[in-house]
Image: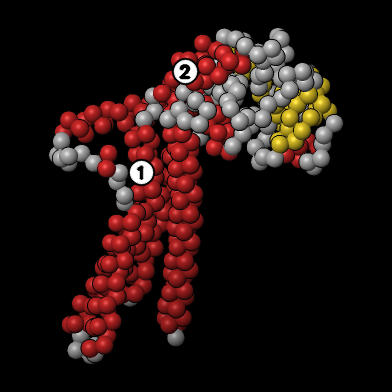
Amino acid sequence: MKRIETGGGKKWREWCLLFFFGAVTLLCFANAVRSAEFVKLQMSELEFVSAGQKGALDYAGARSVWEENQKREHPLEYVNWTQTDGVQVSAPGLGTAEECSALFLCGRSDLLFPGYAVLDAESRYGCLLSSALSGKLFGGKDTKGLTVEAQGRTLEVLDVIESREVFLVCEAGENDPCYFDRAAVSCRSGEIGKTEEIYQQLCGGWKRMESRVLVWITQSACFLIPCILWIYLAYYCAEMLWTARRSERADRMEKIIWTFLLYLVLAGGILVLIRGVQIPEDMIPTKWSDFEFWTEYGKKLGASCQLLIRSEKKIPDFPIWKEFARTLRWTAGAAAGEAVFLRGFWRMQRS
């Protein structure tokens, strides 16, 4: 009797441990997918900037817009303060969400692009707040006419911009240095030429082909988890079918069911694989054995990754590379947890 109770207790503990590993695997997998989606989003923004679309987001176009702005009777500028009553703030610029992200990424919100809401030139003591910052400072959005203190200046809130980003925008004074959002450079108003090198490093050196590779790596890593499960299910169905065929007590219907499940799992996995892996035509070489192509491709990829790492150091809030590494770590954890879970489940079924 004691042996039966001991065996039952051991079985119960094994099932609890199995459930724990399953929960950990699901948690790691969910975090890996979330990080992979974040990498994909950031890469799409980086491609948007590199392509020089919508508002001339290449350096030549940016300089042209800046020069046109300087010809105005009252040139306008953005200034992005980093501290307001102890709250960390930053301004990606005002406009569409995609353009905001692009400017935020490259630290060029000092440039005025078409379609951007800007402050009136004579609003020396006024500012715009995002609704997120307004809520943090005052507890609500109806804050027009109230004053905030930024870098020793008292500013009147002229308007509140609906945005989840935390930022404050105001006009630069004559002696105020214009700090770019995220680039590790600063310059006086009118000395925009100094920023050409850093701008080219961030925008001109990153190729669309290499950015897609990082997205593919993260998505492939996430696909590894269901792929392992698919292989296990196919092997399990094949094992049960083989056992049913060898067993004299197994009836014909049982064999048909296991055969059907095996083909269903194989067909479903292949369809998901075909749908998930879509390689653009410009990435497919004429010959997969083309050594020169892959050598050149490897050099470009290595150079682009180094560029991305350097950008991370210069722009602390530029989180693509860290998120990429985080995706791989979560995926490794999920794969390890899944391997332990499936091994334990297999042993439980065989015992």
Q: Amino acid at mark 2?
A: Ala
Above or below 250: residue 18:
above
Q: Position of residue 248 (x, y in %)?
A: 19, 89
Q: Is residue 180 above or below residue 294?
A: above
Q: Position of residue 113 (x, y in %)?
A: 58, 25
> Which residue is pictured at 20% across the width and 77% down the height?
242
Amino acid of disc 1: Ile
Name the image colouring.
Answer: secondary structure
Is residue 281 visible to the viewer in this orientation of the structure? yes
**Helix, strand or loop for disc 1:** helix
List the residue tagged with mark 2.
60
Q: Is residue 230 left or right of residue 337?
A: left
Q: Residues within 10 Å of mark 1 (few under 14, many from 20)?
A: some
Instruction: Residue 56 in the image: state x and y as whole percent.
Output: 49, 25
User: Which is nearer the N-term, disc 2 or disc 1?
Assistant: 2
For this rendering, which residue is in front, 314 or 200?
200
Residue 25 is left or right of residue 127, and the answer is left
Residue in view at x 79 percent, y 30 percent: 158
- In the rendered image, the quadrant that contains the N terminus is bottom left
Q: Position of residue 161 (x, y in %)?
A: 71, 36
Q: Which mark is residue 217?
A: 1
Residue at image x 47%, y 46%? 37
Please report contact status of discs 2 and 1: CB closer than 8 Å, yes or no.
no
Q: Mark 2 and mark 1: span between their CA atoms?
A: 33 Å
In the picture, measured across the screen, residue 37 lies left or right of residue 207, that is right
Q: Tell me the SS state at disc 2.
A: helix
Q: Is residue 312 above or below residue 143?
A: above
